[in-house]
Amino acid sequence: MTTLVFAGNRYKYEMENVAKLFFPLAHFHFDYEGRCPAADYILFAKEDRPEGVCLSVRADLPGYRAESENTLPAGTPDNLCEEELARQLYRLLEAHTGIHPQWGILTGVRPVKLVQKRLLEGKTDEEVRAELKSRDLVSDHKLDLALKVAHVQAPILSGIRPRDYSLYLSIPYCPSRCSYCSFVSQSVTGKKAVELLPKYLMALIKELRETARLAERQGMRLRSVYLGGGTPTVLSASQLRQLTGAVRQYFPGIGAVEYTIEAGRPDTITPEKLEVIKESGATRISINPQTFSDEVLMRIGRKHTARDTADCFHMAREMGFDDINMDLIAGLPGDSYEGFCRSLLTARDLSPENITVHSLTVKRSSALYAGLGEMEDYRPVQKMMDFAAGTLMAAGYDPYYLYRQKNTVGNLENVGYARPGHWGEYNIYITEEAQSILACGAGAVSKAVLPGKIERVYNFKYPYEYIGQFQDILERKGELEEKLSLLPAAERRRYETEQDL
Ligand code: SF4
């Protein structure tokens, strides 16, 4: 196991993140006293000298030895010293592995936020490009993508007011568990889960009512609703009617805003449920293939075929759904570059209004993690993401939201593409943390987006805790209300000042 050794600094977090760009599944030892083992280490040294701050990296890895050094002016702030060491590490590991992570040393999950901030400061695209390229080593290709997304988002973000919010509802149940899933979602095949579901629904509806009252007391304006999970369509048609009826009753303004229901897995969709969704006033649905390869679907634990997905899509179209999203995943186990391209072309030919392309995230809590080798080669995934971008843009889709997750294969991104005018605004609000989210249900996280900071309030993760300690959930709503009461008056525009980002 490689040891990361620190001398004169403790930049563990950033250095580990950059090292993981090249060795995504590696575990490291750490030493903060500058003591290098006999071999297999990387030393990060910071030393104040008369001529300035000397920053150096020395790598002694199996089959590879290299070092680099740079001196910055005396008094250079810590964050800039840390960035300098990150760049040195990146370049050494790039030379060692032949891998060129396209986001450079940017390991944060919201790269578009950095671009938005600079554009708001009045910088031109070229200035933003030059800065992120030299400072963070981001590739031209990714800068193009981030700038495109930022420009699509700008008019939507500029209309946000501080007391705007989106409502999120969580149904943390699925028909079976996908092998890569790290979410708390429960399989509804278990007897206990089936028994708990009606109780869960009752509690969720109560929380919904309290949330509507809270929003009204705080003078908040509803901007979008998202019913997600899990797979909300695991509910029976009558349960779905009960829930969506409660949403309409407590949030009468819903008819004027974007309202998404994740119909997610084709194996849960029936004409009757789609009818209920139609009546609910939902404006968007998601029908998610993930892949159009039956072999890959089976391998990841999905209990439906590619044909089922296409059939559901056609059924929804015939019923008049005119804003449909499809999710695909690049890098699924058993998939290949050619296989992914076929899936993407199939999705494109179906012509939904939105196609979201995720790169595989492997979290420790997923079943898939246990089966991975020490280092998965993510280069085909990079090629898949590039193919998706080129193909979808040529077909008239624009990228409109983008985020990354920790432990994503190759530290790549997830990108939502849409036909102009079909932007899923909720996705922009949540990925850019641009608006407060009032979230209900197990595993849900509410966010109060205050000037200069974001306060989060967490619900219990699992349905049994959520139901069993429901009084606590209501008390947490009180906490959330206290935070929301600190929001500026409703009239002010949110993106007036740089600190709001
Ligand atoms: S459908 Fe989504 S939430 Fe459900 S198990 Fe699969 S990945 Fe997890």
Image: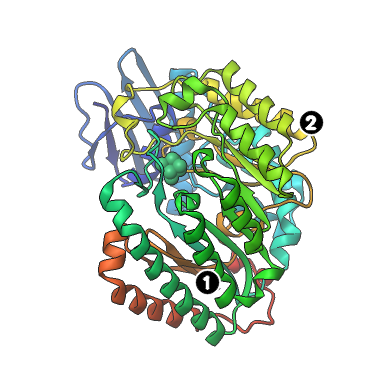
Q: Residue at x 26, y 52 (%)?
A: 192
What mark, if any, has residue 394 been given in the picture? 2
Please tell me whether mark 1 sits on a helix, a strand or a loop: helix
Eye-nearest disc, 2 or 1: 1
Q: Residue at x 73, y 28 (%)?
A: 391
- The x and y percentages for residue 125 are 75, 47
Tell me the kind of residue under disc 1: Ala
Please tell me which residue lies in front, 495 or 456. 456
Location of residue 407 with respect to 95 vertically, above or below: below
- The x and y percentages for residue 401 are 64, 48
Quarter-of-image position of residue 32: top left
Please tell me whether mark 2 sits on a helix, a strand or a loop: helix
What mark, if any, has residue 307 been given in the picture? none
Q: How is the image coloured?
A: rainbow
Q: Can residue 130 be seen here?
A: no
Q: Would residue 490 appear left or right of 430 to someone viewing this image?
A: right
Q: Which of marks 2 and 1 is nearer the N terminus?
A: 1
- The x and y percentages for residue 39 are 23, 21
Location of residue 72 with respect to 120 vertically, above or below: above
- What separation in Å lies between label 2 and label 1 (alpha carbons)? 42 Å
Q: Can residue 239 be seen here?
A: yes
Please tell me which residue lies in front, 312 or 158. 312
Tell me the kind of residue under disc 2: Ala
